[in-house]
Amino acid sequence: MSAAPLLAAEGLSVAFDTPRGRVHALEDVSLAVARGETVGLVGESGSGKSTLALTLLRALTPSGGSIRFDGQEIGQLSSRALKPVRRRLQMVFQDPYASLDPRMTVARIVAEPLRAHRFGTRSEIAVRVAELLAAVGLPEEAAQRYPAEFSGGQRQRIAIARAIALEPEMVVADEPVSALDVSIQAQIVNLLQDIQTRMGIAYLVIAHDLPLVHQIADRIVVLYLGRVVEEGPAEAVVARPLHPYTAGLLAATPTVDTAGRPRLRLGGDPPSPIDRPSGCAFHPRCPIARDRCRSERPALTARDGGRRVACHFPGEVPPPLALRPDPV
Amino acid sequence: MIETARPAAIAPVTAAGRPILEIEGLRVGFPGPGGNPPTVVLDGVDLTIRQGEILGLVGESGSGKSMLALAAMGLLPAPGRVLSGAIRIEGRDLTSLSERAWQQLRGGTLGMVFQDPMTGLNPVRSIGATLGESIRRHQRVAASDVARIAEAALRAVGIPAARERLSAYPHQLSGGLRQRVMIALALVNRPRVIIADEPTTALDATIQAQILDLLRERLHHAEGAGGLMITHDLGVAAEVCDRIAVIYHGRIVETGQTREVLADPRHPYTAGLLAAVPRFDGRGRRLVPIPGQPPGPAAERISCSFRPRCARASEACSAAPALSPPVQGRSVACHHSGGGQ
């Protein structure tokens, strides 16, 4: 990893005013994505992962902290000033049914960012659209058809073609495959990886599917109630989580290769940001919580191996995936 | 609060009890426009669930898995209907039941858990009122006992402060608690068959794990009952089900004990699904997708439906393969299932 990250958020906060008072959706979030790197962002409902994605893309304006893209501060830029950044920082959404305008042909959808950024003449754009459709594995004749004529997987290919049209340096993908059938998910995952290899794009992939994130990400960032609780190389975080929440999340994941193992269970529900617990926000569900956790919020602290964790007692919970039952 | 959930022992097939739910040659279809032949969404499905076991029906969208659940609950959306075949609970065929008889069955002999608990819970009635109504409808109990039974039902599914919750309304509960209430409602009248359609798909990971533990434990402890769980997620089926049936384009393509099917899939579609799912031990390995996409329900059935996506396909596959007779509980519908990869 080079010294200067492509995207760096520091001390990022986002607050919303609601009838029930001010809600802090994100608090003091720091995160960096290097060029060509894949960072996986995981968390449950209310963790703030989608808010974080929208804020990094500047669809939302942070109430505090900084976002630097390739060295430039973009946290408070006007939408006009953001235009050149948008070209380099694109997005793929979860629902390929909702994210494509049903009245536009595929050619128009894919050409839209090209036109907005004055890519070239009409025929240059047409050539580029054909290239892009080929790059995402769609037939040439797809160009003149409408989104409704395509399956979910093909629509996600269209959305990816649109996202890479301007050769961005980074794509934020919010649950890019979770709405797709299992047999189609792998096609899209492989496509995203191939594009990365070819174009050197950095990805921030938001997903609830931990095995998927583990498979594709270089690093994993775990969010809980608007804060980063753990971050580190994907392999290390999964093999030996330092935060008990990460351990619980891993243990909760039903997979075909770990089924039937006795495992750590987290009780209770994820709390609401409206009603944030004192001290460490995870303490009401934490299997190892002590008095200190109820009163004192743990800071995100650097550890060996490029890892960070916000826990007073990191690493005390045994690795969930190592808990194997007696062989049958 | 560390709970080490130990899965209920996975009983071998021989130890399971009498067949409790039998589905035989079930064909379900929707009439074609203008007198055209119907669109067949289930094409000759055979499934048997025995007492004490949970069968997982695994399939992708359009496979017919939810149609099978709806048919078995008498809730097929109009104008869909059972074209032929039988659905039997304890030997009694349900395909010709009146709507009134279905209403008596559902919530009593037949417990149901849906993906969205709001489907099964009335938003303007308290939890206690909904449970009470179901208890009075299906059990002969003194009026004074109803609240006690309802409270016990909530406690049995791990709902804290069960008595106070009786007066709560669905919207006042979290998604996880609502699904627990739904399960309490499915179990309160001691059903013989419990059908759960994607019961954890809408839940967060840590809550899903809690509900899967609960389903596994309660369904195995529901005496003399059998469970059918519909899911798109092989991992979920692996966690909960004793046996798995894989459905593709309205037909069962493979059944067997969960462990055996996952360890040694015989149908190329099952093998393909397993290769396409990310696993914790698969980092750095490329996922192997199944080419193409699942056929829509209206696609023709002249050959093996998986043929266009199958690496093993040959001339023989122009004839649709039948599901083989079970050998040690394993059945496969493939002309090439004997020859390995």
Image: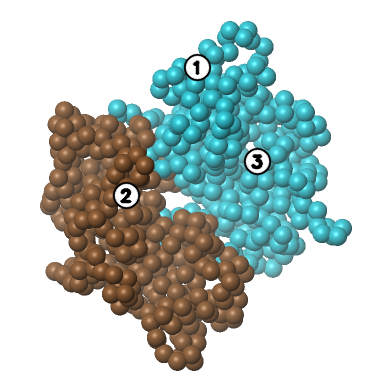
Chain colours: A brown, B cyan
Displayed quadrant of residue A328: top left
For label 1, the residue is B151
Displayed quadrant of residue B101: top right
The chain identifier of the residue carrying mark 3 reads: B
Residue at 29% of width from left, 60% of height from top?
A61
Q: What residue type is labelled 1?
A: Glu
Q: What residue type is labelled 3?
A: Ala
Q: Quadrant of the N terminus of chain B?
A: top left
For label 3, the residue is B69
Q: What element carries label 3?
A: helix
For label 2, the residue is A16
Q: How far apart are marks 3 and 2 (CA)?
A: 42 Å
Residue at 45% of width from left, 32% of height from top?
B173
- B341 horizontally vs B332: left or right: left
Q: Do pointers 1 and 2 mark residues of a single chain? A: no
Residue B219 vertical placement versus B43 (above, below): above
Q: Is mark 1 on a helix, strand or loop?
A: helix
- A245 horizontally vs B315: left or right: left
- B61 horizontally vs A241: left or right: right
* Residue B16 seen anywhere in this rendered image of the structure: no
Q: What element carries label 2?
A: strand
State the residue in front, B169 or B298.
B169
State the residue in front, A116 or B276.
A116
Measuring from the top left, give residue B231's x and y in whole percent: 55, 44
Q: What residue type is labelled 2?
A: Phe
